[in-house]
């Protein structure tokens, strides 16, 4: 039986955060608010928990979840390296609605699905999400919805779709952003295949292409 806690209520948020932390520790799922849309999260280092997340959404291993972090410093621990242009993106847009794909740190023991040696990382700009991440460490987090349906912008909407497959729902009211994060692929900056290493936009969302271009200049790949 899942539980929903109103994070705007001082008493409920204390209990809710404790229950969310315990649920993550048990390998269960938690729905949490972010600055974009609501997300459903699991321990990124528990393959069983990540599989539970994929199953809850009706998603296969070919669609691995991104990883949310609670600080910019955590990025360096999860990826092979942080090229200078990527650091510029982090400085400009984190915390915020930008997900960055990089080659993952080879020494990490985890299984997010068929990632082909990469990981998509984001630091959300939401105090509840950041507080939870500070206690749990990195979480595998995907939008809180069934595959093929719109991402939930309210906790109740997420609960209507995901039900008891999620142990704890943290409700912070309507998502202020309501638009999914922008995803960029910066893997070629670490493992270039030639002289034309570029950052490629995989999905346009909360951060515009124009904003990315202002930070990256000609390192941003032109749209196809």
Image: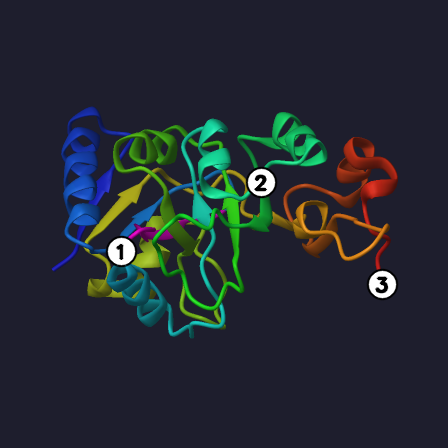
Magenta highlight on residue 17: no
Location of residue 5 in the rendering, given as x and y in whole percent from the top left corner: 21, 41
Q: Quadrant of residue 16?
A: top left
Whichever of callouts 3 and 2 sits on the residue coming sooner in the sequence is 2
- SS of the residue at dot 1? loop
Instruction: Give the Cα separation between the discs numbered 1 and 3.
Output: 37 Å
Mark 3 vs mark 2, foreground winner is: 3
Horizontal and vertical percent position of residue 71: 44, 28
Of tags 1 and 3, which is closer to the observer? 1
Task: Name the colour scheme.
Answer: rainbow
Q: Which residue corresponds to mark 3? A: 224
Residue carrying label 1:
46
Instruction: Note whether 74 is above or below 207 in the view shown.
Output: above
Residue 185 visible at all: no
Q: Identify the secondary structure beneath mark 3.
A: loop
Magenta-highlighted residues? 37-45
Q: Which residue is mark 2?
A: 97
- Does the residue at mark 2 contact the one at mark 1 (Cβ under 8 Å)? no
- The quarter in which the N terminus is drawn is bottom left
């Amino acid at each position: 039986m899942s539980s929903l806690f109103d994070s705007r209520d001082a008493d409920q948020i204390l209990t809710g955060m404790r229950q969310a932390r315990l649920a993550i520790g048990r390998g269960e799922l938690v729905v949490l608010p972010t600055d974009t849309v609501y997300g459903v999260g699991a321990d990124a280092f528990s393959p069983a928990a990540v599989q539970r997340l994929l199953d809850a959404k009706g998603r296969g291993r070919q669609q691995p979840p991104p990883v949310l972090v609670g600080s910019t410093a955590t990025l360096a621990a999860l990826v092979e390296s942080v090229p200078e242009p990527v650091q510029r993106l982090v400085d400009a847009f984190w915390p915020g609605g930008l997900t960055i794909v990089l080659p993952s740190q080879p020494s990490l023991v985890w299984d997010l699905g068929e990632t082909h040696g990469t990981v998509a990382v984001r630091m959300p700009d939401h105090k509840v999400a950041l507080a939870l991440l500070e206690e749990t460490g990195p979480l595998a987090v995907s939008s809180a919805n069934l595959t093929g349906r719109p991402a939930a912008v309210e906790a109740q909407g997420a609960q209507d779709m995901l039900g008891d497959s999620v142990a704890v729902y943290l409700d912070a009211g309507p998502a202020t952003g309501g638009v999914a994060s922008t995803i960029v692929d910066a893997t070629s900056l670490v493992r270039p295949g030639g002289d034309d290493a570029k950052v490629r936009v995989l999905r346009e969302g909360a951060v515009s292409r124009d904003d990315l271009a202002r930070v990256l200049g000609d390192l941003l790949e032109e749209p196809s």
